[in-house]
């Protein structure tokens, strides 16, 4: 298994998050990159709501990603982003926390790293984020 997917210290999540943020100074660009690189690996666990059909149909209004018992939601409204991370148990939401985009991204990448240790498709998607392919 590669360093990116081994789940150990080899994957510097802070560096990866910083790299994604540097490549996408606009949060809308960042979300488009994440959706583009993760859609195949996550399938139905990734839900995307677009801004509209006529005005900028590629604009993402909301992204929702479910990984295990966690759900990562990011909603863009007039250039501002609201990020929420929720935890479920037995299908019932037991906790939700509003967090900043940096914490949201870091925790999402950590959850992806953990899943990549056992799932080939997620490992490939995470490697794509690390090396910048696929967008």
Image: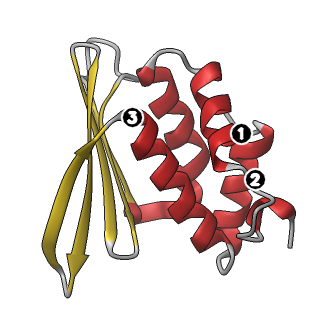
Q: Nearer the viewer, mark 1 or mark 3?
A: 3
Q: Quick one: SS at disc 2?
A: helix
Q: Residue at x 86, y 73 (%)?
A: 1
Write down the quadrant of residue 93 in the picture: bottom left
The label shown at residue 117 is: none
Give the Cα distance between marks 2 and 1. Answer: 10 Å
Q: Disc 2 vs disc 1: Cβ atoms closer than 8 Å? A: no
Q: Quadrant of the C terminus?
A: top right
Would you say 31 lies left or right of 117 here?
left
Q: Where is 15 relative to 41, above or below?
A: above
Give the Cα distance between marks 1 and 3. Answer: 22 Å
Q: Residues within 10 Å of mark 3 (few under 14, many from 20)?
A: some
Q: Nearer the viewer, mark 2 or mark 3?
A: 3
Q: Residue at x 36, y 22 (%)?
A: 59
Give residue 111's position: percent from left, percent from top.
51, 64
Number of numbered labels in the structure image: 3
Would you say 7 lies left or right of 51 here?
right
Q: What residue is pinned by disc 1?
A: 134
Give the Cα distance between marks 2 and 3. Answer: 21 Å
Q: What residue is pinned by disc 2?
A: 127
Write down the quadrant of residue 44 in the picture: bottom left
Label 1 vs 3, first from the N-terminus: 3
Q: Where is 48 relative to 92, above or below?
A: above
Q: Residue at x 25, y 69 (%)?
A: 87
Give residue 122's position: percent from left, percent from top.
63, 65
Q: Disc 2 vs disc 3: Cβ atoms closer than 8 Å? A: no
Would you say 86 lies left or right of 105 here?
left
Q: What residue is pinned by disc 3?
A: 101
Would you say 41 lies left or right of 76 here?
right
Give residue 66's position: percent from left, percent from top.
36, 64
Label 2 vs 3, first from the N-terminus: 3
Q: Where is 44 relative to 115, above or below?
A: above
């Amino acid at each position: 298994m590669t360093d990116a997917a081994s789940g150990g210290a080899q994957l510097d999540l802070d560096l990866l998050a910083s790299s994604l943020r540097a490549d996408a100074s606009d949060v809308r660009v960042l979300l488009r990159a994440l959706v583009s690189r993760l859609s195949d690996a996550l399938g139905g666990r990734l839900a995307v709501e677009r801004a509209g059909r006529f005005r900028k149909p590629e604009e993402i209004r909301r992204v929702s990603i479910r990984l295990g018992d966690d759900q990562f939601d990011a909603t863009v409204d007039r250039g501002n982003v609201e990020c929420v991370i929720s935890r479920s148990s037995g299908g019932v939401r037991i906790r939700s926390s509003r967090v900043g985009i940096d914490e949201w991204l870091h925790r999402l990448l950590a959850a992806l790293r953990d899943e990549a240790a056992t799932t080939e498709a997620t490992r490939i998607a995470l490697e794509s984020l690390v090396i910048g392919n696929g967008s």
